[in-house]
């Protein structure tokens, strides 16, 4: 247990809420990719059983381990064949953006629910109620993690959605050059993870921005609820 406490950057008492958040966030994210790809004419993900809200088919073990020890990671990417789209580049952008946008929407919904509970007085006795404490921890992690995943997935590095969006935006010649660096993606992520200087300019600012978004949306809904 001491070894796990040192290895995993998430406090052990928060780990169940963290994993539940990832279970929801990753599943909805990948389902969104698959849903819009199928809607635009590419049944690849659906035929492979990926257009589902079953989290077991979306989780990537290495990506989850990186999230627990480094603060960022990924799920199994949904396969998309853009050749099946009538307008490959435009529809490719929409399919790629669907994942991060789903996390943005989950964060907003989480902020609304949390603010509603607070406005209704449900959390007033949180210091004396373990269930309310669990609700507080869960929504705190759920809101911030979804906003973080929204921002993180827009980074233009493979295999993230931001990279796929850039691929569909830039001219074909530049796209070919970009694809040459895909094989180095894992090494780039490991460098970001283990070199504090790089992390300070990547993961840390995203975490701060996710915290700011969380606070702003919760306050927005509290204002709407008259608090």
Image (cartoon, helix red, strand yellow):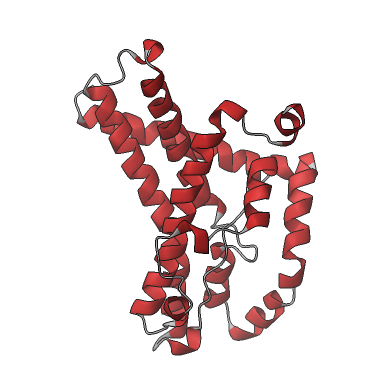
Examine the image and state in which quarter residue 171 appears. Answer: bottom right
Residue placed at 55% from the left, 63% from the top?
162
Examine the image and state in which quarter residue 31 appears. Answer: bottom left
Name the residue nearer the viewer: 125 or 162: 125
Name the residue nearer the viewer: 169 or 108: 108
Name the residue nearer the viewer: 49 or 25: 49
Residue placed at 78% from the left, 41% from the top?
197
Vertically, is 14 above or below 39? Answer: above
- Residue 33: x %, y % from top left: 44, 68
Q: What is the number of callouts on the image?
A: 0
Q: In the rendered view, does 8 fall on the left or right side of 33?
A: right
- Residue 192: x %, y % from top left: 74, 49
Vertically, is 73 above or below 47? Answer: above
Q: In the rendered view, does 52 fall on the left or right side of 167?
A: left
- Residue 89: x %, y % from top left: 47, 81
Residue placed at 69% from the left, 77% from the top?
179
């Amino acid at each position: 247990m001491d070894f796990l406490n040192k290895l995993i950057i998430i406090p052990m008492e928060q780990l169940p809420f963290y994993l539940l958040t990832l279970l929801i966030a990753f599943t909805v994210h990948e389902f969104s990719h698959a849903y819009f790809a199928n809607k635009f004419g590419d049944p690849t993900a659906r035929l492979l059983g990926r257009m589902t809200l079953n989290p077991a088919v979306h989780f990537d073990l290495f990506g989850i381990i990186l999230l627990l020890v480094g603060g960022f990671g990924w799920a199994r990417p949904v396969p998309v064949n853009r050749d099946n789209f009538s307008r490959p580049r435009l529809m490719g952008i929409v399919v790629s953006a669907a994942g991060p946008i789903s996390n943005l929407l989950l964060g907003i919904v989480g902020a609304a629910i949390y603010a509603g509970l607070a406005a209704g007085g449900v959390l007033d006795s949180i210091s004396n109620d373990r269930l309310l404490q669990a609700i507080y921890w869960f929504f705190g992690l759920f809101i911030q993690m979804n906003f973080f995943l929204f921002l993180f997935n827009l980074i233009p590095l493979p295999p993230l959605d931001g990279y796929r969006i850039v691929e569909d935006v830039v001219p074909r010649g530049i796209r070919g050059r970009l694809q040459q660096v895909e094989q180095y993606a894992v090494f780039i992520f490991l460098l970001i993870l283990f070199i504090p200087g790089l992390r300070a300019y990547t993961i840390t600012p995203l975490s701060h921005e996710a915290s700011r978004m969380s606070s702003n949306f919760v306050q927005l809904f509290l204002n709407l609820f008259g608090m």
